Amino acid sequence: MNTVQAYVTRSDSNFVRVKNLDAKIKEKLNGIGFTNDIDLNEYKIITPNDEKKAGVFNQLRELEVYFSDGREWCPAEVFEYLRDKGLLIGNFTMISWRGPDKYFITTDK
């Protein structure tokens, strides 16, 4: 089973939100421009347009951050949308849940 260090929780607005589970990635998120949202215990970055969001997604993918799968306009669907627009290329890794603490990891094709 893959170790989950972080995953994108939301990306359907002008923000990308990441749940960080590994202290080692904190500085890397800060280096991209993320700030800690203490109220939600997540990191966030402003993404005012699709180009900026695609750039952030690409950097997150390189850090092996996963993209949440699930309901409509989940981060995995937003990644696919940006890829369909030609702003991203390649595969990404998704995380999905079957219940509390029961998740599975897949790579899109």
Image (cartoon, helix red, strand yellow):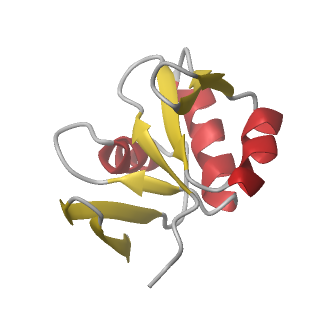
Is residue 45 placed above or below 57 in the rendered structure?
above
In the displayed structure, 4 sits above or below 59; it is below
Q: Position of residue 3 (x, y in %)?
A: 53, 74
Image quarter where the N terminus lies is bottom left
21 sits to left or right of 84: right
Where's residue 28, x and y in %? Answer: 79, 46
Residue 99: quadrant of the picture: bottom left
Residue at figure coordinates x 16%, y 43% from the top left: 71
Residue 57: image x %, image y %? 57, 44
Q: Specify the farthest residue to the bottom.
A: 1
Quarter of the picture containing the C terminus is bottom left
- Do we see residue 109 in this rendering? no
Q: Position of residue 13 (x, y in %)?
A: 39, 20
Q: Name which residue lies at 49% across and 21% down.
A: 15
Asked whether residue 78 appears in the rendered view, the answer is: yes
User: Image check: 69 left or right of 55?
Assistant: left
Is 9 positioned to the left or the right of 56 in the image? left
Q: Quadrant of residue 53?
A: top right
Name the one closer to the observer, 108 or 34. Answer: 34
